[in-house]
Image (cartoon, rainbow, N blue to C red):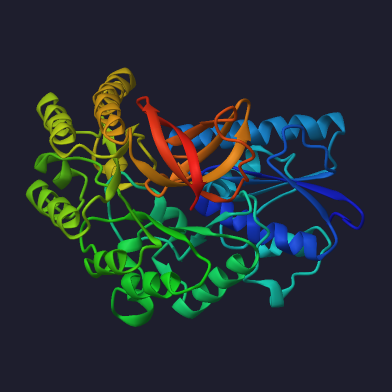
Amino acid sequence: MAVIKGKKVDVVTLGCSKNLVDSEFLIRQFEANGIEVTHDAENPDGEIAVINTCGFIGDAKDESIDTILSFVEAKKRGDIKALYVMGCLSERYMKDIGKELPEVDKFFGKFNWKELVTEIGATYRRDLMNERSLTTPAHYAYLKVSEGCNRTCSYCAIPLITGKHKSKPIEELLDEAKRLRDGGVKEIQVIAQDLSFYGYDLYKDYKLPQLVEGLANIDGLEWIRLHYAYPAGFPMDVLKVMNEHPNVCNYLDIALQHASDNMLEIMRRGVRKNQTMRLIEEIRQQVPGIHLRTTFITGHPGETEKDFEEMVQFVKDVRFDRLGVFPYSHEEDTYSHKKYKDEIPYELKQERADYIMEVQNGISNELNQEKVGKTLKVIVDRQEGDYYIGRTEFDSPEVDQEVLLHKDDNKELTVGNFYSVEITDSEDYDLFGIARFGK
């Protein structure tokens, strides 16, 4: 056990925003014990390091291992005295990496990180169990509404890491959102492995619409954005909430992963292409102007050139506002790993992913050109060089495009404030504008 009184802890978070939320809960506990904490510091200088790892796909696992090894070397040099590892990679490979990395003082999983507080000599404060110290800019935060997933997608290791879907009660989430609001948060990203399933385990009914309604009624929350919905069983009533509440962004992140019936069946997605098309049409009809974000996977076992071409045509036909593509990763103990050989070369997977993104670049450029001359509500996230950098309601932090406001044309803007911005120019993934007045 490390003695931490008067010591400094560096916390490093890898992977997704759901991991980030876990780190924020942990940091709050540290700070409540009088511990100085830095998060993702460029030059960590604490005596204790905590690495919150990702174990979702190959690239993320490699990054986690590389980061751990860099801190192992720091410990050998005497730059740090103690090293702890937590999170998804640790949860998934606890026994194996414990043997391979004996220099790590102790490994914790994704759900027992609270024990880390006492491990380093601090006291876990149960009265603060739902409080966080934000690592994001003060004006926005992530709200993790559930953990785990009940789906059985062939390629996905998430259920192996997180287990079954577990929703947080609506009342707890609304209290958490109010505390965030009271701390200055104006924008909330609602996140989960599967938003569509939210509430069923607690209430025997899908409760995302009711949750979003409750969030929308919290004074001071100006933007509420939904991430990671599932197409099968999507709760359509949430679209009514979007229309009725202007602070619910006309934005939806809904992962589709493929577009050919052959691959959707192999990937065990529980939905067919024509059902997906009808869902998209219905969403766009019910919420005019909604911006859709999705992700696709290239190179899953069984994907033929015909399947890939069908996915490309789907992207061209649907014209998503935001899109990401990932080469398939052959993850141990998943259905695909047990049933199929990973026969498609990585180079071909990447080539297919690059081609889809090339197609999307053109679509994004055309959609952005349509915004030139319009006036949009923009929140300013930061200053960078000669620009203020902001986003519209159609853009989530870190993953989507930004609005660049040159300081010569935009005098004394304030980070965290909203402005009405006239869009003057565009590129594939950026807009340029001039703030004409406050929101």
* Residue 47 horizontal/vertical position (percent): 85, 43
Residue at figure coordinates x 74%, y 34% from the top left: 72
For the question of whether residue 191 can be seen, the reply is no
Q: Quadrant location of residue 119? A: bottom right
Q: Quadrant location of residue 152? A: bottom left
- Residue farthest to the left, as pictured: 274
Total numbered badges shown on the rendered structure: 0
- The foreground one among 420 and 318 is 420
- The foreground one among 416 and 82 is 416
Q: Quadrant location of residue 249? A: bottom left
Q: Is residue 122 above or below residue 60?
A: below
Residue at figure coordinates x 10%, y 43% from the top left: 261
Locate residue 188 relative to residue 200 in the image: left or right.
right
Locate residue 272 relative to residue 16 in the image: left or right.
left
For the question of whether residue 170 can be seen, the reply is yes
* Residue 275 horizontal/vertical position (percent): 10, 53
Q: Is residue 149 above or below residue 403?
A: below
* Residue 240 horizontal/vertical position (percent): 25, 68
- Residue farthest to the front, as pictured: 436
Residue at figure coordinates x 81%, y 35% from the top left: 75
Q: Quadrant of the N terminus?
A: bottom right
